[in-house]
Amino acid sequence: MQRRTLVQSAALAAAGALMALPAMAQTTWPTGKAISYVVPFAAGGTTDTLARLIGQQLGTALGTTVVVENKGGAAGSIGSEAAARSAPDGYTLLGGTVSSHAINISLYPKLGYDPIKSFSPVTLIGTNPVVLVVSANSPYKTLKDVLTAAKGKQGGLSSASAGTGSSQHLAVELLAYKSGVKFTHIPYKGSGPAIQDVISGQVDMMFDTTVVAAPHIQSGKLRAIAVTSPKRLASMPDVPTVAESGVAELKDFEVQSWQAIFVPAGTPTPVVSRLHDEIRKILAQPDMQTRLKGFGMEPADMSVAQIATFQKAEVDKWAQVIKAANIKVD
């Protein structure tokens, strides 16, 4: 009888220890080791800007250091693949975008990661349209000006992007597809260097996120031509939508970019939950909400499960768009 009681007690203790493992993982992580926040684009772009805003506060909340690492190239594919191959231990975060985690899978036949199977979503930071900009010294003031000039130039006007397959690239390809006007795509390794060449006039134009473009528009270095949202932005009330251009073929034109945070697949659920909760608190702060809206972003507040569903729908949507427009990587 005593032996049975001892065996039962040992079994219960073992079961209790197993049940406590997730809680222990949640309380012991992080151990003081620095967390790498991989940005799969060059410094100065939207993903980089958000990573630095979030990373500093996240490090304080977790009692450790968050180091932003830029690994740009191939519209976010290079950095995303590197993150996917990292240990799923909670010490690698990835700034994922509509490009890296919804578009690239339909563009690159030999993509080194699966945007859904290789990662677990943590947070959807927000969504935002892109805005068509030209240099402040450009002669183009309306979308009709841009289309007319492109028609009259061999190869069309040049248009920069953060990389082949990025939302900036797809925006100009959709514009070409719907309007029947050709453009020459100039890919860069991120928005930062791309927009500098638009400012200097080396490239005619660019679709870029409002996060990156807004400061340059406000400083007078860039002129905003049109936004790709279905209605005008509160942060840019004087800038018309593409649909308002008066071009019949563009009446339903819409491109929305989004920013999210992922971890490698297999990262412990308690760690994902802790990251989700801490980042959600950071994003919910009034000053951060104001900052995001000032960028022209619409802040999001989804559960991890909702983000997964949203991402799957985005992958399916862009696959249809890419096929319909016959978009190919260079």
Image: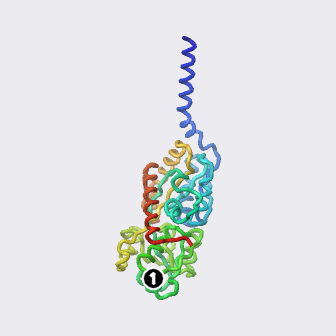
Question: Looking at the picture, which amino acid does disc 1 mark?
Answer: Val
Check disc 1: other Cα within 10 Å, few if <14, some if 14-19, many if 20+.
some
Residue 169 as seen in the image, left or right of residue 37? left
What colouring does the structure picture have? rainbow
Q: Give the farthest residue toward the bottom.
A: 152
Which residue in the rendered view is the most extreme toward the top? Answer: 1
Q: Quadrant of the N terminus?
A: top right
Q: Specify whether 42 is left or right of 286.
A: right
Q: Residue furthest right?
A: 33
* Relative to 329, residue 117 above or below: above
Q: Is residue 327 above or below residue 35?
A: below
x then y, percent, for residue 68: 61, 57
- Can residue 291 be seen here? The reply is no
- The residue sitting at 37% across, 77% down in the picture is 249
Q: How many marks?
A: 1
Residue 97 vertical placement versus 213 (above, below):
above
Q: Position of residue 254 (x, y in %)?
A: 40, 69
Q: Give residue 300's quadrant in the image.
A: bottom left
Instruction: Say whether residue 271 is visible.
Output: yes
Reading the image, the residue beneath label 1 is 146
The quarter of the picture where residue 187 lies is bottom right
Image coordinates for residue 246, horizontal then vertical, percent: 35, 80
Residue shown at 59% from the left, 47% from the top: 90
Q: Position of residue 202 (x, y in %)?
A: 57, 81
**Could you tell me which quadrant the C terminus lies in?**
bottom right
